[in-house]
Image (cartoon, coloured by chain):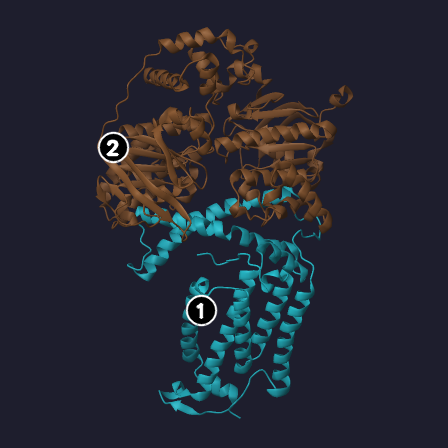
Amino acid sequence: MNLFNYSYEDTFIHRLSGLTKLLSFMALTGVVMYIYDIRVFAAILIFSFSVMRAARIRMRDLKVIFIYVGIFFVINAVLSFVFAPTFGPETYGSYTLWIPIAGKYNLTYEQVFYQISKIFKYSSVVPLGVIFLFTTDPSEFASSLSAIFVPYKISYAVSLTLRHFPDIQKEYGDISKAQQARGLDISSKTSFWHRFKNAAATMIPLIFSSLERIDVITNAMHLRGFSKHKKRTWYSRRKLKKGDFAALVVSFGIAGAAIYIAVFVNHGRFYNPFQ
Amino acid sequence: MDSIKEAPVIEFINFSFKYFAQSKPTLKDINLKIFRGEKILIVGPSGSGKSTMGNCLNGLIPFSYEGEIDGSLTINGTVTQNTGIFELSKTIGTVMQDSDAQFVGLSVAEDISFSMENDCVPQREMISRVKDVATLVGVQNLLKQSPHELSGGQMQRTSLAGILVDDVEILLFDEPLANLDPETGKYAIELIDRIHREKNADKLKTTIIIEHRIEDVLHREVDRIILIDDGRIIADLNAHEMISSGYLLEHGLREPLYVTAMKYAGVDVTSDLTPGYFLTTDFSRIKGDILRWYESVEIKTHIETGDEVLSIRNLDYEYYKNTPVLRNINLTIQEGEMLSIVGTNGAGKSTLAKLICKFENHSRDTVFFTGKDVFDQSISERASFVGYVMQNPNQMITQTQIYDEIASGLRLRKVPDAEIDERIDRVLEICGLTKFKKWPISALSYGQKKRVTIASILILDPKVIILDEPTAGQDYHHYTDIMKFLEKVNKLGVTIIMITHDMHLMLEYTRRSIVISDGVIVIDTDSTEVLTNPEIISKASLKETSLFHLANEVGIIPPKSFVDRFLDYEAGLKYESI
């Protein structure tokens, strides 16, 4: 299973420049992070799913991601309720009892609404990230980062991570299998602590071989003048075209509309149906 | 011309270098002049200092590896220590041994342009220059490919293009053959030669190749061979003088096989036979000697006995739907055999090994240990029968103490401590590691670590051991060491299967070779048959051994019978020396 599943398809979304996709991704996630309005989340969710469809991203490629996100939602929902069972009522300034449980753990409509909104919030971000990762040529990723003034050394570090991620993944697989052959059990048959310890043992050779690899890569880069100047140019940077501007207008339009709703309709970050 | 030749491009004067972390200098008192337009081969056993010399030339010393420098190294008249790595990289371009790690871009074009990007060359100019050099090295149709889609040879050519865009004067190749299969290696040597000559016309390029696989480099001409051992220059001779000098064997390096054959035949190999390259060697004068020796060697008959230990029947395998990796694999291996599995990268040989060990899943009734289907056995159950030794020992070692590392498989199988200790003593004995019993792993050399990983497999008493490239990156001395050790293990009755590119290994240590190409077994026969059959050779990305050419040269038909006798004779010598 490869997490960064870029493969080229000839769609409008794939043809956009990496910079456009990065900026759109940042604008939309930024706004989702800032506001707290289930209606906006729902709108962005529908928007991003339709973009995913346009980019011909198949749902079955996302199965693993969806499973992880699902687990995260469940854990997050439980923990939110355990640690802040009255965050909803406090935020919305009202208290409407739904199911009495015990003391502050009484379930309120406000809390339920707050937590459902939260699930919508996170779920609207996930497809945006998926679109970005699945349709952006990794080559372009570093150059787009540096276009938004991220120092190029950091951009390149990101790009190299993308470059070597599959190798390291494969190496981990091999090392882990070799350890299992020795008798190390990392299946679900043993206790969690045991599995953790065994998985850690597998990491040791991986870390050492990765450090070795980093050493060679650093040398290779210095030998070809990396970090010589404060700036560098990028072979794979694409000029923005009409489609890019259109896409930017749409995504910044959505972000702008969301902020407009927050400021002039909701008068704050939160949409409050309880008033 | 002569006026240019007077000033050397590279000059070492009383040059010594000591790494800070080490107590003794790695390079001692080097005096060497290299002139513009020369093509130099630097040879030496592992640890001789040849790679350090390369790192001094390209500036990694002292930029990345600090140490003490005595004497001076000048390139184009300036002392390198004062030049700095960036400036040096405009004069001397390095193609590193590990071209996968050197590949820093995410596509071929991007990697080629890397140094231009760092020089802030405008995009438009980069695109046209990339196109030019890509055409020069023959990767012009691969510009958009990502490194994961490239073969080792294609990656290396990309690396070469990446330094040629800078129009460097000196090309430095650090073990260019290390990660290539024999056929690709042959093309690499041809390409290096072509680039050296082509550019020579107007710019006079200087080429330096660091390698220990001498015969393979001498597929094309070089001006001088410099032999380094223990940090010193031992000899600085042309190919004919070097090959006939006897220095190579003395310093743990392998001489070309045709030269070995000539010596077996009693020929006094002197430089007037011009034996530096196969093509220049004057065989007409020694034909009689070779033929006479050929007739005199006794032919031995080899009978394979033993029961079936491992068999594969109708095995198909695919990672993704409709892209088969292996198709209809059938093979039977007898107890006590020692054999090679060969083929190009990505042909499916490693996958086959992994399926046998259940690192990957296969279907029922395909893999059999002593005739029993092992579909239901887990990885660790199978490991008690067949052990898998990975290429890089560092990928297998998880403990800090040798004892713990070897014991780990038994401890995880809940064997009592007293029994573990007893079994470890026995295995250490076999592996020649007895005196290291209480040592930490960090104190061991690469070859010793390899033995530890084999020991940690042997302790489980497997019937079969599969080794992935057991001799990769090893010089002749260490190679012989490992192979002799494996022969010893084999004599104990353990069946040994090796996945390899190394033709010497195939020839000298394994009578049987299985050739896999594009996921199918092309042939399963004598190694000598494989290496004397041009059709199989090209399918498996191997190349003919020079013994084959020698047989043709003196008119022995079929050439296989000459190679067979050579090996029988050699086996006889080995037997006598024991």
Q: x, y (%) of residue B503?
A: 43, 28
- For the colour brown, the matching chain is B
Q: Which residue is mark 1?
A: A69
Q: Is residue A187 visible?
A: yes
Question: Is residue A254 placed above or below B33 in the rendered structure?
Answer: below
Question: Mark 2 highlights which residue?
Answer: B335
Amino acid at circle 1: Val
Q: Residue at x 24, y 41 (%)?
A: B369
Residue A207 place in picture, x, y as percent:
46, 49
Quadrant housing residue B163: top right
Q: Are marks 1 and 2 on the same chain?
A: no
Real-space Cα distance between discs 1 and 2?
51 Å
A8 or B439, which lies in front? A8
Look at the image and tell me in which quarter the N terminus of chain A lies.
bottom left
Which hue belongs to chain A?
cyan
Query: In the image, B88: left or right of B307?
Result: right
SS at badge 1: helix
Q: Judge the density around disc 1: few (<14), some (14-19), many (≥20) Cα neighbours within 10 Å.
A: some
* Residue B367, horizontal then vertical, whole percent: 28, 44
In the figure, B190 relative to A124: above or below? Answer: above
Is A138 situated left or right of B308 in this image? right
Chain letter, disc 1 residue: A
